[in-house]
Image (spheres, rainbow, N blue to C red):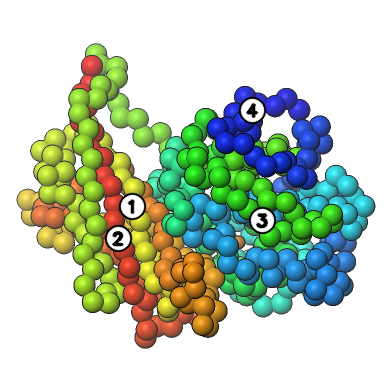
Amino acid sequence: MKLSRRHFIATTSAFSFVNFGTLASAQTVRVRRNFDTLRETDDDLLALKEGITQMKSRSSTDPLSWETQRRIHANWDWQHGGWRFFPWHRVQLESFEQIIAHLTGHTSFALPYWDWQQSRFVPESFFDTASPLYINGRALNPTVDVSLARWGRQQRFANLALDSFSTFVGSPRSSGRVENLGHNLIHMIVGGAMSSAENATEDPLFFLHHANVDRVWSTWHNNSVRPYPSDFSREAISGFQTPNGPRPIVFAGQILDTVSMGYTYDNPYPFPVFSVTATPPEGKTKREKISARDYFAMAKIEGEPTELSVDLPQEAINAIREDFDQELSIEATGVVRYGLKNLQSRVMKVIASAPEGGREGLPAPEPVVLIASAAFFHTPKPGHENGHEKHHDLGATFAFGDDIINLIGLSKGPITLTSSTIPGRGAETDTKPIATGLEFTLKVTRSKWI
Ligand SMILES: [Cu+2]
């Protein structure tokens, strides 16, 4: 296995790491494979089942037990709702792999992944009640198509291959698209233990789901060089158990490439990529940027609202309506936030709409859904709501671009972003969570064909 240049950059960045602890050397790269391609007699599948059985038979206080896995994940360490999501779970899965390898003697064990983008259905063997992969209480059954969580259905969800760091990974305290749209929705659709952060790892499917999430990150990372903020690289991940005892601290910057953790994937994640290149007019070949302007706006909060609204800046809208052709492009990143109280089993949603309707007597254009993110978080323990690290709300990052130019161009009056929450299965319907933030940064770029 040849080390890529990226790998070299990633592991030799500006700050120094304490040590590489148990990180594997590049000579022993294991391959994580698609669960659907495994046969019943494959070593990885046999070891997975055998290892889970052994972990379950260990006492709950044993560091290598199944219950210890649950406790580690239940412990709030900002592993959800922010950019620690990817590195935290990467270390979690690799520690889990070490335990399975140790307990079963299958030292090259690589965790299979469940590709919910292509497979769409949970593999049948997870519903065999005699299998260690089974758990009672899931909401879905083998016939439920999880395509609801697929990104390929809408262009907005499918530009992941082009997404910036903040859109894809998120910020320290707001989740990115992969967590919102891929990860959270699958947790909710699978249901049962999977629907809460406290119990999720009790379902063996958790590990295969997260292996696919990890594969998505790996694919995005390998697609092109993307700068990671240095604060992200310095995120310290700890709290895991390995066969050799507690795992030493790992920094996110050390594990940007899976090879540094000793594994890779059989195939990259199949990003759906839409071509959005406009056709140039006769005789022109490319667009030249003339100017770009940034706008920032945030919703005013009064009292305890359950919905928030904020308008796109009128100046930006006017510019787009005047030049409703190919000369403008827009790009925006925003964050929506809600208090945790009553948020369980709800979906945070932001829509863009034109409340005054269509221009020149046209019907009002359809509102555009900018995000619909299932809330997946850790419930604060009673009495710990005001702990030193308060996590009283949950934020999700959303993005929009040229896809709402039609909404702007075909309507009159303001364009309003509105946040709300919609109840999912098992949600309280008479008590709504409190909105704590809605804001965005918008860049309008003017260009001409040359
Ligand atoms: Cu998790």
Identify the amino acid type marked 4. Phe
Q: Secondary structure at mark 4?
A: helix
Mark closer to the chain start, 2 or 4: 4
| Residue to which mark 1 is pinned | 334
Q: Secondary structure at mark 1?
A: strand
Which residue is pictured at 88% across the width and 54% down the height?
A: 102
Residue placed farthest to the top in the image? 283
Report how far apart the C-alphas of labels 4 and 3 lie in the structure: 23 Å
Q: With respect to residue 353, does 329 lie above or below? A: above
Find out whether the residues at labels 4 and 3 contact each other: C-beta distance under 8 Å. Answer: no
Find out whether the residues at labels 1 and 2 contact each other: C-beta distance under 8 Å. Answer: yes
Report how far apart the C-alphas of labels 1 and 2 lie in the structure: 7 Å
Identify the amino acid type marked 3. Ser
Q: With respect to residue 98, does 391 lie above or below? A: below
Q: Position of residue 114 (x, y in %)?
A: 67, 54
| Residue to which mark 4 is pinned | 8
Work out whether residue 212 can be spotted: no
| Residue to which mark 3 is pinned | 238
